[in-house]
Image: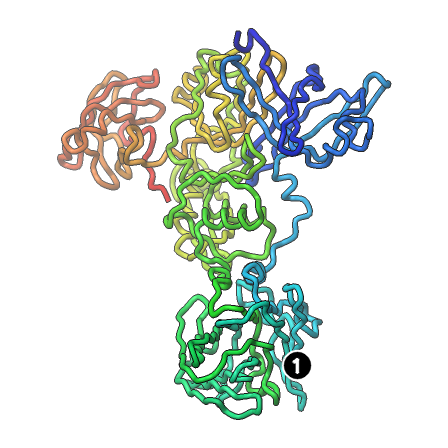
Amino acid sequence: MAFPDDPLRVRVELQLGEQWLDITGDVYTESPITITRGRPDEGARTDAGSCVFVLDNTTGRYSPRNPRSDLYGKIGRNTPVRISVQPNPSGPRLVRFVGEIAAWPVTWGTPHTVRVSVTAAGILRRLGQGAKPFDSTLRRAIPTHEPLAYWPMEDGASATQAASPIEGVGPLLLSGARWAQADSLPSSAPLPTIASAGSVLPMMHGPVPAPTAPLDGWNVQWLYRLDAIPAELRTFMCIRTTGTVATWYFQSAHLSSRIIGRDAHGRDVFVQNVGTGNDLFNQWVRVRFLVRQNGPNVEWRLDWIDVGGDAGGYGSTYPGKIGRPTGVASPPDGYSPLLDGMALGHISVWPAESTPAYGGAIDAWAGETVGNRMQRLAREEAVPLAYTGRLTALGTRVGPQAAATLLDLLQECADADGGILYEQRDALSLAYRTRAMHYTQAPALTLDYAAREVVAPLEPVDDDQAVRNDITIARTGGSSARAVLETGTLSVSPPPAGIGRYTEQRTLNLHTDDQCAPTAWWALHRGTWDEARYPSVSVALHEAPHLVEQVAAVDVGARAQILNPPRWLPPERVELLVEGYTEVLGVRTWDVEFSCSPGGPWLVATLDDAEYATAASDGTELAAPVTAEATTFAVRVVAGPPWPTPEQSGEAFPLDVRIGGEHLVVHAVTAPAAGRQTFTVTRGANGLSLPHPAGAAVSLVRPALVAL
């Protein structure tokens, strides 16, 4: 027999290595298992999920340090646990929670009542504890591509040398510098700037270890910024090698640059002058110098690449050998005072003629879509992430990746997009559901209040907790946009015309300034949705077992609805968005309490949806009073285009419209004549048939909206 005639068949398992161990027999059934997931109280962030149950520890089996236990050495901090149920003996087992047990607190009254009260938690708990902010995107990316040498030069203000994160590479010595001064490069922590002091000129030396195999090519890259343009050629960088050219000199000035190659005796192998523009200054520039052996000749090329902009360069050949790079340095006579203030950093040396290491990291991944960033971060940190949404170029784009923790960076993406970051139910994994995946989704759960499928109390809250009618959205480091509701019942107008001003200002890591306006208007739409909230909706599955399959499928971000609400509430169906839930599993009981927010704002225009593919005019009112019995009446469009006729949009009919508290079904609409249109209707679609005055607003029951 199925639940509730038979027990719910709850199973509790611990993961020991690759195997799951069933410990259900040690779980106290007198203490129900309580599971909580999602966002409580419409919070901005999702809390770590939790699962609470009690184990019989009379034998000491669940004392991790007890050598008498058969689980000794197998359980401890963050042991994975899985909770599942099987309501139907012939049906599938439903996983309700997967998490980690961080502690095994033992309590006892007598030697015969020894217990372990377990509180398991989802992956968010562990990821949020003791997490350090990420390094800069360049510092994170470059070492993963295995350079011969790399010096980020992101050291602190009192540093005297630049440490290397590459094993076996010594520090880069740099005298005459102000450390941690240049902070305008989003992909880097602050870098040093050159500063000559009297007769003591800055000097630099960074030794490069020998590669493990002979090289057919190599390259050196670095970043600099100099806001004062030198009037004369000055050496920005030197590279020392074992090749025919023992020292490379790279010089720049106003509208010109020069590359000099000298042998081990200081004699010129070649001198190459190159015409360059002043775009080498007043911005961050990445320099890429490469050489390759081509038979008896050496091919070389120098490129200047504006960070976030254009690239240009010059290349040539000479007879000889490329050798290997042995170090980066300043010229023998030191840096010129004309280079004072030049920022320098992220010097890297590579055992090949090219590397993808700088890639998107050079721009701090600015312009990445939310999906690409979240998946990249999860991949880099080896954290599982289930992503629900389209991974396309049309997704929300975000700005530069900051030096923050993993969870903060993921939440920053969620905030910019407007989706939900949460935990997967059946795996130890994060999950993300995009904003777009909330739009006009099919209901995951439909409850009939009249059929007693909702456990009392069902209590609407008609308050101003979520009301925001004056919203400003700013882009991190950029501009802002403001959206204000000027008219209507929830407008900024003082009562009774409105409710007064409720302001909110948020800064989001958006990619461009033009994203601010639509984001602000979407937030205003949600903040001025004029319906009561239903923060909590409860279902007792042991009293309504026919709902088990529906309820078990409901997850964070799903759409739910309640039909036939009690007569003391508005008669239309209640639309909900599930933010989370708490479920209590007993032997023959299964109670679920959903945390909900208004679902109406998410029902937006969808071209292939039978209910939400019809657009109304921007403003329509009754042209004359209407009695409670009238089935035809005239309307006047005061803003926007006229209503479509059946000839123009037959598939859209019938239309469900609202006048006051009454819902009506419109079967026909005449073409506009003298500024008026006539509706043919069926009255009382929600059980009400009321008289209405001239000027009463006429609107679609489910207004069509433009999705971002």
Q: Look at mark 1 in the image and give the residue it sits on.
A: 176
Nearest the eye: 209 or 461: 209
Q: Is residue 98 above or below residue 520?
A: above
Q: Is residue 90 above or below residue 15?
A: above
Residue 430 at least partly seen? yes
Nearest the eye: 615 or 629: 615
Tell me the crowding category of disc 1: few under 14, some 14 to 19, or many 20 or more residues within 10 angstroms, Cα based.
many
Residue 284 at least partly seen? no
- The residue positioned 41% from the left and 37% from the top of the image is 437
Q: Is residue 529 above or below residue 256?
A: above
Q: Name the amino acid type tagged 1.
A: Gly
* Residue 550: x %, y % from top left: 46, 20
Locate residue 128 relative to residue 672 in the image: left or right.
Answer: right
* Residue 707: x %, y % from top left: 36, 41
Q: Is residue 638 above or below residue 661?
A: below
Location of residue 210 (image quadrant): bottom right
- Helix, strand or loop status at disc 1: loop
- The residue positioned 45% from the left and 28% from the top of the image is 576
* Residue 60: x %, y % from top left: 80, 24
Nearest the eye: 309 or 262: 262
- The residue positioned 80% from the left and 20% from the top of the image is 58
